[in-house]
Image: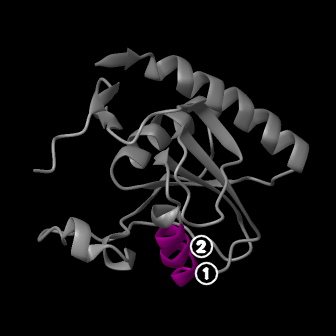
Amino acid sequence: MQHHDVEALIQRMAADLRKHIETDALRDPLMVGIHTGGVWVAERLHAALKLSEPLGKLNIAFYRDDFTHIGLHPQVSPSSLPFDVEGRDVILVDDVLQTGRTIRAALNELFDFGRPAHVVLAVLCDRPGRELPIQADVVGETFMLDRHEQIVLNGPAPLNLTIEQKASEE
């Protein structure tokens, strides 16, 4: 099992986001974390960037297209976006980007709340295995893992990132 310095990755992401915000001239961006790990990362980024609006939280359980593989959690909490996203710049945050399906579901949910002007995707971990053409704008670290390994983020305090062997599927 490999451990990684999550706080250092988040500080790198915050620095990259600051540059991205300045370069793209994003005006007073909103930040939205994807439940659960994306919210944990977003909480730290939101504080580091000192954003003026409160943090939004998306729960994409009803938008997933893989219920047959992962099942539906019986206690699904609603999304919380304490602001209007219409015409606003949004930083969407998740913990791991692999297939792209979680991000697709998050975008569907986000657009149910309104049409943002611009969405920037920030992920703590990027790894191969895309099934959809989705790419992060800001990445904490890219991991080249084999198919028997998985990224696990535990939290919320402290955040602990490990690379582990997947459980045998026998």
Between 31 and 93, the one nearer to me in the picture: 93
Q: Label 2 sits on what residue type? A: Asp
Rounded to the nearest whole Å, what is the CA distance between mark 2 and mark 1? 7 Å
User: Which amino acid, by three-letter code, is at mark 1?
Assistant: Gly
Kindly give the residue lying farthest to the front in the view shown. 170
Q: Position of residue 124 (x, y in %)?
A: 52, 37
User: Which quadrant holds residue 62?
Assistant: bottom left
Q: Is residue 111 magenta?
A: yes
Residue that carries the numbered disc 2 in the rendered image? 84
* Mark 1 element type: loop
| Residue 52 is a magenta residue | no
Mark 2 secondary-structure assignment: loop
Tell me: 68 left or right of 110. left
Residue depicted at 53% across the width and 79% down the height: 113
Residue 160 against residue 45 in the figure, above or below: above
Q: Is residue 100 above or below residue 49?
A: below
Which residue in the protein does label 1 denote? 114
Q: Is residue 31 above or below residue 40?
A: below
User: In front: 165, or 101?
Assistant: 165
